[in-house]
Image: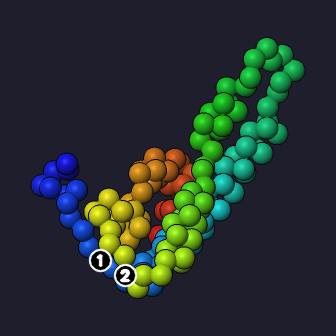
Amino acid sequence: MGMFGEDKMYVTVETTELLERLKTNRKAHAETYADAIKLWRNDLSHTCQKLDVSGADSFPKKLKRLEGSCPTSHVEEYDRVIDMFEMSVSETVKLDMHNFNRYCRDEWGWKAGAMSNRYYAMSAATRKA
């Protein structure tokens, strides 16, 4: 059980409103990802052009850094949930706090890690400006 009994908190929301929110959040994520991956590809291209591998005896560290910072798309997670609710025959859905935070507030478990990625952060900052 979570703090203050939060695991026992539920809310019933309209399925159509939930779907609208999910689709809006999905679109925002897809756009942020597209910008982030474009920035990453530009860095990768620039790094590869400057890379001298003539005397290399191991994988270039500069490329390892870029490999570890490649943005990840989570569009499929949104699509899975959207598909589920589009197939629902119910006009309302009951959500616990965990799922409400993910689906309605766009606070997924992966979000903090994604936003700590420099390419996602740069993309998000550009979108807010």
Amino acid at circle 2 = Thr
88 and 112: which one is in front? 88
For residue 78, what is the image quadrant? bottom right
Query: Which residue appears at 26% of the width and 73% of the height?
Result: 11
In terms of depth relative to the viewer, which is nearer, 104 or 63?
104
Please tell me how crowded label 1 is: few (under 14), some (14-19), or many (20+) other residues with Cα within 10 Å. Answer: few
Q: Which residue is mark 2?
A: 92
Closer to us: 46 or 38: 38
Q: Residue placed at 60% from the left, 36% from the top?
A: 68
The furthest residue to the front: 89
Q: Are marks 2 and 1 in contact (CB under 8 Å)?
A: yes
User: Which residue type does callout 1 highlight?
Assistant: Thr
* CA neighbours of label 2 inside 10 A, class few (<14), some (14 to 19), many (20+): some
Tally the numbered discs.
2
Q: Is residue 25 left or right of residue 107?
A: right
Going 46% across and 47% down the picture, which residue do you hit?
Answer: 113
Residue 88 is situated, as x and y percent measured from the top left of the image, at 49, 77
Residue on which the image places disc 1: 12
Label 1 residue SS: strand
Q: CA distance from mark 2 to mark 1?
A: 6 Å
Give the structural element (helix, strand or loop) at label 2: strand
Which is nearer the N-term, disc 2 or disc 1?
1
